[in-house]
Amino acid sequence: MNVNRPRLLIASLVVAVAVIGGYAWSLSGDDNAGDDAGDDTVVLEDPTDRDIEADDIGLRPNGLVNQLPDATVSDRDGNAITTASMLGDNPLVINFWFSSCAPCAKELPDFAEAHAEFGDEVRFIGVNTIDPIPAMERFADERGVTYELFRDDLAEFTDAIEASNFPITLFVTSDGTVIEQTGVIDLEGLRDKISTLQQQEELI
């Protein structure tokens, strides 16, 4: 069989050019696809690149209220007591608690001791939203509490400070300014906060 070598050579060159051209085109297509993909790529923000402000997570620094809200609680005889009537003479330490709250129970003796130390200069108030009055008084008495206790029967006061976790303690100047709102606190913490409260009171 005779083979026409010039024609075979030309055909081989044509095939080679086609293959090389196709490969080059495919590379070009990949580059373009990469460009297009880059246009659609979503880069997620690294959370470590920014500070999270209190507002970002629905909280405000130093508590949820800046002024003692208007609300009504009741004393052991069922008499209505307004928060406004608590103001005027001394700064306030107002503790929200109930007996089945384990952290509340744990910190009550510290409140009793702090009251023994500062009771002549600071008015201590306990606010209970759950326990019946006899149970509330018995539970507090067993832990040495002798300061005023009130029932927040309708959770009016509790709702007004946007309470979600217990215990909660408000440190309030005599003009009603809430300078601090804390959760669980011990005796040393109470002493520190009360010292700050008294310093703030001197500025009024």
Image (spheres, helix red, strand yellow):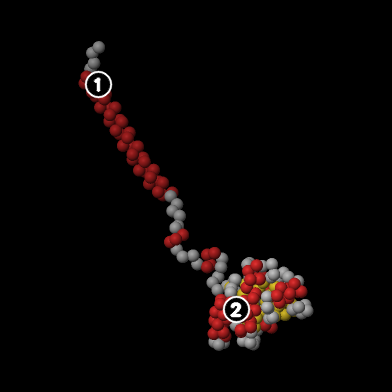
Identify the residue position indicated by label 1 in the image. Answer: 8
Q: Residue at horizontal 69%, vertical 67%?
A: 100
Identity of the residue drawn at 54% across and 64% down: 57
Specify whether 175 is left or right of 139. Answer: left
Mark 1, secondary structure of its residue: helix
Whole-percent x, y for residue 142 in the image: 70, 75
- The crowding category of the residue bearing disc 1, from other C-alpha atoms within 10 Å (few below 14, some 14 to 19, many at least 20), is few
**Percent from the top left, x then y, of residue 115?**
63, 81
Count of numbered tags: 2
| Point 25% across, 21% down: residue | 8
The earlier-in-sequence mark between 2 and 1 is 1
Residue 72 visible here: no
Q: Does the rendering let one see residue 29?
A: yes
Measured as percent of width and height from the top left, residue 189 is found at 56, 76
* Residue 28 lies in quadrant: top left
List the single residue furthest toward the right: 77
Residue occupying image coordinates x 55% and y 87%? 202
Quarter occupied by residue 50 = bottom left
Q: Mark 2 belongs to which amino acid?
A: Phe
The span from disc 2 to disc 1 (Cα, nearest Å) is 99 Å
| Side (left or right) of 71 relative to 178 | right
- To which residue does mark 2 refer? 171
Work out which quarter of the rendered image holds the N terminus and state it: top left
Looking at the picture, tell me which residue is in the foreground, 52 or 202: 202
